Image: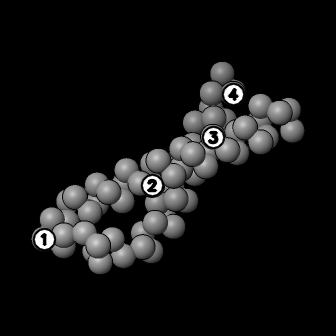
């Protein structure tokens, strides 16, 4: 139970940090600016993917190895 809560919280924190980091990227420069919903969807999906990968890296380096 505590492992699941720890894993979920690490994933959510990493997704939030990656969303914050990716919000500084100007996606409007290489996307069609007339479709803002698609740009927002790209930002959300990119932050979820980056956050998931980062969380998996953190979990692999710390929790699974017993640190």
* Residue 12 position within the rendered picture, expressed as x and y whole percent measured from the top left: 54, 46
* Residue 5 position within the rendered picture, expressed as x and y whole percent measured from the top left: 62, 32
Question: Which is in the foreground here, disc 4 or disc 1?
Answer: 1
How far apart marks 4 and 1 lie (CA) works out to 44 Å
**Residue at numbered disc 2:** 47
Of the image marks 4 and 2, the number of the one nearer the N terminus: 4
Residue at 72%, 37% (x, y): give it: 60
Please tell me in which quadrant of the rendered image residue 3 appears.
top right
Secondary structure of the residue carrying tag 4 is helix
Q: Are marks 3 and 2 in contact (CB under 8 Å)?
A: no
**Residue at numbered disc 3:** 56
Of the image marks 4 and 1, the number of the one nearer the N terminus: 4
Please tell me in which quadrant of the rendered image residue 67 appears.
top right
Q: Is residue 38 above or below residue 3?
A: below
Secondary structure of the residue carrying tag 1 is loop
**Residue at numbered disc 4:** 3
Q: Are marks 3 and 4 in contact (CB under 8 Å)?
A: no
């Amino acid at each position: 139970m505590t492992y699941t809560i720890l894993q979920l919280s690490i994933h959510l924190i990493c997704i939030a940090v990656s969303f914050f980091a990716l919000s500084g990227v100007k996606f409007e420069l290489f996307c069609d600016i007339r479709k803002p919903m698609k740009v927002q969807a790209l930002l959300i999906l990119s932050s979820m993917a980056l956050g998931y990968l980062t969380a998996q890296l953190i979990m692999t380096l710390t929790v699974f190895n017993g640190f």
